[in-house]
Image: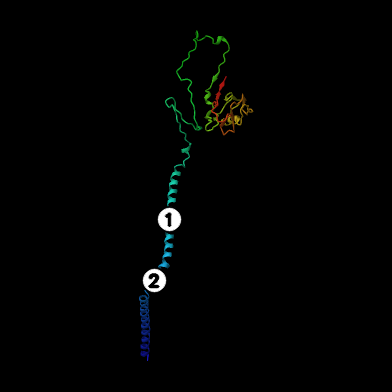
Amino acid sequence: MATSSVTSTQKATSSAAEIATANRSTAQRLISSLSAGSGVDVAALAQNLVDAERIPRENDINGKISKNEAKISGYSAIMFMFDELKTKLSDLKDRNDFNALNVANTNPSAFSVTPGALASTGPREVEVTRLARAQRTVSDGVASANSSLNGGQALTLSLAINPSAITPGVSTIQGDSNTPTTENSIVTFKDMVVGQTVTINGLTLTATAAMTAAQVAAAYANTTEGSTPSNPAGGSFSGTLTGFSSVASNGANLTFTSSTADTNVTDLTVSATTKKN
């Protein structure tokens, strides 16, 4: 009985496979007969339907790919430019490169010029009024080593210590109507002791006690043209400041500005004495 059942199942399975094969064969013959009878290229029609569905999507994908590739190229170009900018900026990071001043001397054979720490930009004029030369001065002789001097009268000697030791330094920016620029001078004062004097364009300060350079600058600060400031501690003023006015001091430095705008005026005059009797 079991053998008969297996045989019956195998026959049923074989019959189903044969039916499916027969159906596919019938369908193929039907399609072939339709193509032959109607003049329609069914294979081409099927391909066109597939292409109509595929090509728009394919074009859309390709467009996105091209767009992303363009973005990548753009980003690469930007990165390259930033690298170039970084290289250029690295050359500018040292501020010392901008602190140095160069001097253009129209007559280097006559004299040389070296800019100092307080040098400022602008044209300068140098006028030579006298050439240095060797000099010897001999006084009248006396009859003997015991001869009296000055006819036996009292004699006063004045000794002068080198006044340049306390003479303030001056750096001037010339006035110019074309720029326009108002002339101004930066004066760097020095320490003073009793009896020493400093004169700035007619305004004289005499030290009655020791004064630091910053105290001297503060004494001259905020002075208007034609005025005489109040006497500071350790000093007294005489005369008036002419042609210039000053602002607040910065340590030992003080800026004097010409009262005549945009004009190349006579430079600020600075002098000092350091006599002791």
For this orientation, the residue located farthest to the front is 38
Element marked by disc 1: helix
Task: Assess whether mark 2 and mark 1 are in contact (beta carbons under 8 angstroms).
Answer: no
Q: Is residue 212 visible?
A: no
Q: Is residue 48 visible?
A: yes
- Residue 139 spot, x, y in % from top left: 49, 12
For this orientation, the residue located farthest to the top is 143
Q: Amino acid at mark 1?
A: Ala
**Which labelled disc corresponds to residue 17?**
none
Q: Residue at x 52, y 25 (%)?
A: 164
- Residue 6 spot, x, y in % from top left: 37, 87
For this orientation, the residue located farthest to the right is 230
Check the image and report above or below for 239 versus 141: below
For this orientation, the residue located farthest to the bottom is 1
Q: Residue at x 41, y 65 (%)?
A: 55
User: Would residue 102 appear left or right of 206 to someone viewing this image?
Assistant: left
Q: Nearer the viewer, residue 82 or 34?
A: 34
Instruction: Kindly indicate the quadrant of the structure image that contains residue 241.
Output: top right
Residue carrying label 1: 70
Q: Amino acid at mark 2?
A: Leu
Q: Quadrant of the N terminus?
A: bottom left
Instruction: Kindly indicate the quadrant of the structure image that contains residue 154.
Output: top right
Check the image and report above or below for 146 versus 80: above
- Residue 28 spot, x, y in % from top left: 36, 78
Specify few, some or many for label 1: CA neighbours under 10 Å numbering under 14, 14-19, or 20 or more: few
Q: Residue at x 56, y 9 (%)?
A: 152
Q: Quadrant of the C terminus?
A: top right
Instruction: Kindly indicate the quadrant of the structure image that contains residue 203.
Output: top right
Indicate which disc, 1 or 2, sits on the residue closer to the N terminus. 2
**Which labelled disc corresponds to residue 45?**
2
- Residue 175 spot, x, y in % from top left: 53, 30
Q: Residue at x 54, y 19 (%)?
A: 159
